[in-house]
Amino acid sequence: MTISVVVVDDEPLIRSGLRAIINAEPDLTVVGEAGDGAEVLPVVRRTQPDVVLMDVRMPAVDGIQATRLLLDGLDPAPRVLVVTTFENDDYVYDALRAGASGFLLKRTPPDDIIAAIRTVAGSESLLFPEAIRALALAHVTEQPKPNGLAEYQLTDREQEVLRLMARGLSNAEIAGELILGVQTIKTHVANLLAKLGARDRTQAVIQAYESGFVPLR
Amino acid sequence: MVANVLVRGSTYLRWVYLLLGAALVLAFILVDSGLVSLLDDLNLPKVVTAILVVLVVAVPPLVLGILPAVREVEGIAVESLLGVRFEERPLGPSKTWAQRRRTTTWFCLHLAAGGLVGILSTAVFGFGAVLLAAPFRSPGQRELVPGLNYQVTGRWTDIWMPLATIMAIAALFLLSAGIGALLAYAAPRLLGPTPAERIELLERRTATLAERNRLARELHDSVGHALSLVTIQAAAARRVLSTDPAFAETALAAMETSARAALADLDHVLGLLRDDRRPGSQTAPQATLSNLTRLVEATRAGGITVGVRRTGDLEQLPAAVSREAYRIIQEGLTNAIRHAGRPADDLTVDLLINLDKSGLLLELTNPVSAGAADHSGGGRGLAGIRERVAVLRGTVEAGLVADRWRLAVRLPVAVTTKA
């Protein structure tokens, strides 16, 4: 199965570079490009990609707004992988909260860029769990709720699975850890995402951090 | 404590500062005595002579104190000799009459204190030398000054003479240290900035700091952008080197150009900055002169006629200068519209951009209405332009030429010829 990708960046040279890196892989292909957040929605409607590589800083409509537009406007929506120049960019966390599945630094080695696209497309595990934890630590200012995610009435199993998800374990690894079948884990994941109203693992893990269900410190 | 004062280096530096005052007093006395003897020869009524003498004595120090440079010179002397640190560093020449008045007061204080210490120093060292030598002379009656005699006995009691000298020298330096301390206390109040000037100084410093911050942030952004671009293009080129050599070649050229531009930007801004700050967050990249066409078209869309002449290869400008130039033009255009005092469709703005070896020149001229002319001197827009230009070490000229308002900004740029 080929993973289709749309590249969004205001700099044509970044787009052409990413396109060459992605197209060099047999199972990945770039199906469209956009030079600004405002152009993303029509391109994605037309090309139906699996993953959108989204630059954060763009002149007219930035990556956060564009991510929101995509995820609110489309069903099914593609996975959004935010691409940024700076590690300590305040907007990365905003983009994750807006629904992006993960983020990449532009200086990431090409093999890791490819791996990240595959991870996000497969949605089998969390991309860069440590980085997401660090971002949450830097940006979550509210006091954790005393009862965590109690209002969502997760089962004990689902709570266990969510904790392991936050550590970055894949479905297969969680299955190994809990001595259960992979299919059972997939069901648990789907159920807990549905209960939390989360789009994917990243969103669920961010909720787990923000509510204090998984302690940050 | 007395011994403490006498071994401290600052005591002697302060004494030197006072002697400078004494030297000036001596110079004034030489001039005054000449003039006063001339006055005497005129045989004027006593009252008139007295008034003239007072004038002759008082006017030269007052006139000197008013000279702007005196504040600068006194500032240096006070900092190095009295050990005072002013808030405004270095102390500039007086710019306002309040500053001149205060500087004159200080100058007169310096002369008075210096004159006193000068006289005492002369006396102490002059008579001291005589008294130190006295016990070694043959016994008898000696004259110190006419009417003041002392007795050399040749016995041990003569020891009071060198002792008195040492005591007098110690007293002299104690007194100098005391007067110096008083002056050091008064200096910031008289020579330094007043509270109002201090606030102004602080505001200027804050504005400059904010500008520097912004420059640093933008440098971080632009260099970060260029390096990301180079990284991605290099990674892509390596992957397709054998399958798509044409792409690899284009990528190499793009990397070369971006890296060179980033270096130029880095070079330029680091020359202007000493301190570096954390990068901030701003989602839109900053506009440069390459976006000028869009700005001019937006202005024209408002019904304003904008004539643009540009010479020189503006692509060669370091990005930092290009960004600032864009902003200056943006503010200049806004000001032109604001101060036109007439319907916009009746407004012509001429913009000249010239880049050559002497640097970058931006010149905006536009008509001003009679009513608008009086307040066009110091709008916030112009203040903003001055701050930007100051950080880039350029110059600003703004004023009426015939019936048109002219804003000319010169920015120094090291233009490197393209390889």
Image: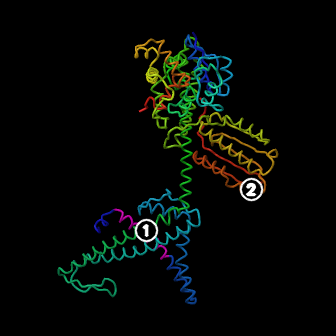
Foreground residue among B356 and A28:
A28
Q: Position of residue B410 (x, y in %)?
A: 64, 46
Q: Chain of mark 1?
A: B
| Residue ID at (58%, 32%) | B261
Q: Position of residue A6 (x, y in %)?
A: 62, 19
Asked if residue B83 shows in the view, the reply is: yes
* Image quadrant where residue B357 sits: top right
Amino acid type at mark 1: Leu
Farthest left residue? B155
What's the magenta region? B9-30
Amino acid type at mark 2: Ala
Asked if residue B259 shows in the view, the reply is: no
Q: Is residue B220 above or below residue A72?
A: below
Q: Chain of mark 2?
A: B
Residue B164 relative to residue A200: left or right: left
Using the numbered discs, state the Cα–Cα distance from disc 2 to disc 1 in whole angstroms.
Answer: 47 Å
Residue at which label 1 appears: B183
Foreground residue among B248 and B340:
B340
Q: Position of residue A28 (x, y in %)?
A: 57, 13
Would you say the residues marked 2 and 1 are in contact, meaning their CB atoms lie under 8 Å apart?
no
Residue B373 — which label?
A: 2
Q: Quadrant of the N terminus of chain B?
A: bottom left
Foreground residue among A114 and B233:
A114
Q: Quadrant of the C terminus of chain B?
A: top right
Residue B131 relative to residue A25: left or right: left
Q: Is residue A186 above or below residue A206?
A: above
Q: Position of residue B207 (x, y in %)?
A: 57, 49
Predominant SS along the magenta part: helix
Q: SS of the residue at dot 1?
A: helix
Reply yes or no: does residue B15 show up in magenta: yes
Reply yes or no: does residue B185 show up in magenta: no
